[in-house]
Image: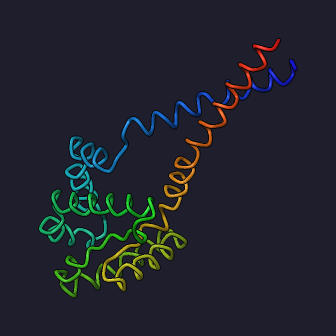
Amino acid sequence: MKPLKWILIFFFVTLTPLFVLLLSIKVSGVTPTFIKQTLERRNAYTLLIDEIETSLKDSKDESARELLPFLKKYVTPQYLQGKTEKLIDDTDSWVKGKATSPVISFAEIKKSIPPNLLTELSSLPKELEKQSPEEGGRFQKELDKFVKNDFSFPIGTYLVWIKTLYQVYRFGLPIVGVILALVVVGIYYLTSTV
């Protein structure tokens, strides 16, 4: 009986931290509301706009710098916050199996872009391709899809790992809890009969 007891103790020592981790995630409340509030408290939207503006100002590409006034007019921190919060809610529903794959759409911006700016936007990958052919080609494909899909970007394909992780967590917590309870009962039984 001693080897079985040590095996059960090994499982207890191994599974307890996993169970505590999964339980703490459940109790801590990493919810869409928590994520949205954290982003807002950290001024993430304003910081992102500032970073984009700095990148465009410092760009050597003239067409990229021409985007700056347009972006300042349409892409505000409030606009980004609204898009991000909708994406967080849509992703949460999708992960839980209540909705289809999340998509972020900027269709209203596409309608506002002057045709010449759209043409210049399409030329950006060509400039990138001169510097890095592989990256430029990949970026061109993504940009073409983005423009053809009315400035919409399917996010679900990039977040499949979150959905998988959620499923593991969702089923893992009760399974680990039951196994841990059986291990404790087994240890108690083996200890009391020795």
Q: Quadrant of the C terminus?
A: top right
**Furthest-front residue in this view:** 193
Residue visible at 45% across and 73% down in the picture: 139
Residue visible at 62% across and 43% down in the picture: 175
Considering depth in this image, is 182 or 67 the residue closer to the camera? 182
Query: What percent of the width, then of the height, locates residue 185?
Result: 69, 25
Query: What percent of the width, then of the height, locates residue 57?
Result: 23, 60
- Vertical comparison of 125 with 85: above or below: below
Query: What percent of the width, then of the height, locates residue 35?
Result: 31, 47
Place residue 187 in its image quadrant.
Answer: top right
Query: What percent of the width, then of the height, locates residue 160?
Result: 51, 62
Is 9 displayed left or right of 31 in the figure? right
- Vertical comparison of 56 with 127: above or below: above
Residue visible at 16% across and 71% down in the picture: 70
Place residue 73 in its image quadrant.
Answer: bottom left
Considering depth in this image, is 149 or 38 the residue closer to the camera? 38
Residue visible at 31% across and 83% down in the picture: 150
Q: How many marks?
A: 0
Considering depth in this image, is 166 or 158 the residue closer to the camera? 166
Place residue 90 in its image quadrant.
Answer: bottom left
Q: Quadrant of the N terminus?
A: top right
- Vertical comparison of 177 with 91: above or below: above
Considering depth in this image, is 64 or 72 the residue closer to the camera? 72
